[in-house]
Amino acid sequence: MLDPTTSQIILAIAILLAVIVVVVIYQVARAIREFRRAAIRLASGDLSKPVRATGTLRLAGLAETLDEMASQLQGRLSDVVQQRNELGAVLSSMREGVMAIDLDERVLSLNRAAAELLRLSPEQTIGRPIQEVIRNAALQKFVTQTLRDGAADEAEMNLRVGTSDGGTRRYFQIQSGMLRDARGERLGAVIVLHDVTQVRRLERIRREFVANVSHEVKTPVSAIKAASETLIEDPDIAPEGRQRFLRIVARQASRLEAIVEDLLSLARIEQQRGEVQAELEGQRVLPVIQAAVETLHTRARSRSVAVRVEDHDELQARINPALLEQAVVNLIDNAIKYGPEGSEVSIRVTSDHDEVVIAVSDQGRGIEPEHLPRIFERFYRTDRSRSRELGGTGLGLSIVKHVAEAHGGRVSVDSVPDEGCTFRIHLNPTAYAATAAHTKN
């Protein structure tokens, strides 16, 4: 039997051990609960709060390890987010359209340029098959071939984009490449669209311009050559015949000179557009109109055409007088030339919707509606034979358009067949301190 003292010591030790065990168990349980909460935070992506390092030394070490792991994960996630944002910013700022297509030919993503070029809504496009998004057999075949071959490809095609009025045709240079994950496994394809509609339009204009210049120059050159060869081969030609051929040479040489002069005028206006806009000054428009009318007074009188000017004397605009006079001369000259003898040409200067408008109207045969959209193009004529007969180069209205644009303005035309045309130059007005009445005072 243990003596009372020993029994009390053993009981005290047992109680102390029990207390120690309870405390340790409590601390371990609390640490485990903290680890559980930390694990839940980590799983949800919250890496900002550290794990509390409480409890035993081993548990404290485990907490420090978890903290270090969370810190590393947070750094890597920050890098991933930054890279994603940078990639998104690059794609958003690109002028080229970029689309990602998965292996099932469904749209994974597209940047803002692609949505604008193809007139698509990203929310309604992502996840849908490319066949539903763009109904173009050539593009569908292009995507299918890229996914099947697993190789980069490129092609040029025209696509109808938009749904209003059947959409519009646009030309695209399309390139493709494979979309792969970090292990090199294929995920789909990337399609890059370069809008080359404007380039193709300029190429078409250039080809037409070269063809038209060649044709316009060839006609007088051929006539000059034929007349010259006749004079050379037949030295005994009668004086009246010689004069006739010399008049042909002189007339066609004048025509060539007019074509070259108009071409040089167009080139000067285009090259000096920035300088012209910088030199524009607020001036009255009426003196320019009067100078143009005076220039064509003899021609108008030869055809018995009355030129009438209606204007508001006080109207001003930011103009280059010499250039604007050239444009107005071209419009009045056309009105005199294409109107019937004994008709009237009216010129009006008005203010309309914050614009100063110069309108030149004739009483000619008018222009058919289908010609109006192209009437200001170089060498465009509604009646080539009649234009050449009257001495036109086909460049006058194009010069008018370029002069208006150099002034920061625009041109417009209205026409009623068999009743006549009205051509307008729209100019930016300039502020002036007083009306005509105040000016007189």
Image (tube, helix red, strand yellow):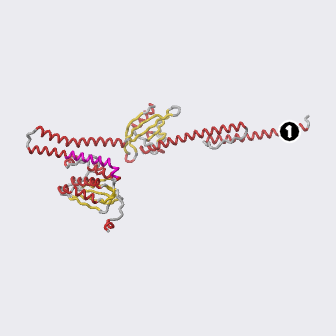
Q: Which of 345 and 166 is in front in this view?
A: 345
Label 1 is placed on what type of residue? Leu
Q: Which residue sits at x=60%, y=39%?
A: 73
Q: Quick check: 338 left or right of 20? A: left
Residue 238 visible to an observer of this rendering:
yes
**Residue bearing the label numbered 1:** 11
Q: Position of residue 401 (x, y in %)?
A: 30, 51
Quadrant of the rendering where the N terminus is positioned? top right
Q: Quick check: 26 left or right of 290? A: right
Chief secondary structure of the magenta span?
helix
Q: Nearer the viewer, residue 225 or 109?
A: 225
Q: How crowded is mark 1: few (under 14 residues within 10 Å), some or many (20 or more)?
A: few
Q: Does the magenta stretch include residue 259?
A: yes
Task: Pick out the residue farthest to the bottom.
Answer: 441
Q: Classify 438 as above or below 327.
A: below
Q: In which quarter of the image is residue 319?
A: bottom left
Q: Which residue sits at x=14%, y=44%?
A: 246
Q: Give the range drawn in magenta.
A: 254-277
Q: Where is residue 432 in the image (x, y as percent from the top left)?
A: 35, 62
SS under mark 1 = helix
Q: Which residue sits at x=12%, y=40%?
A: 231
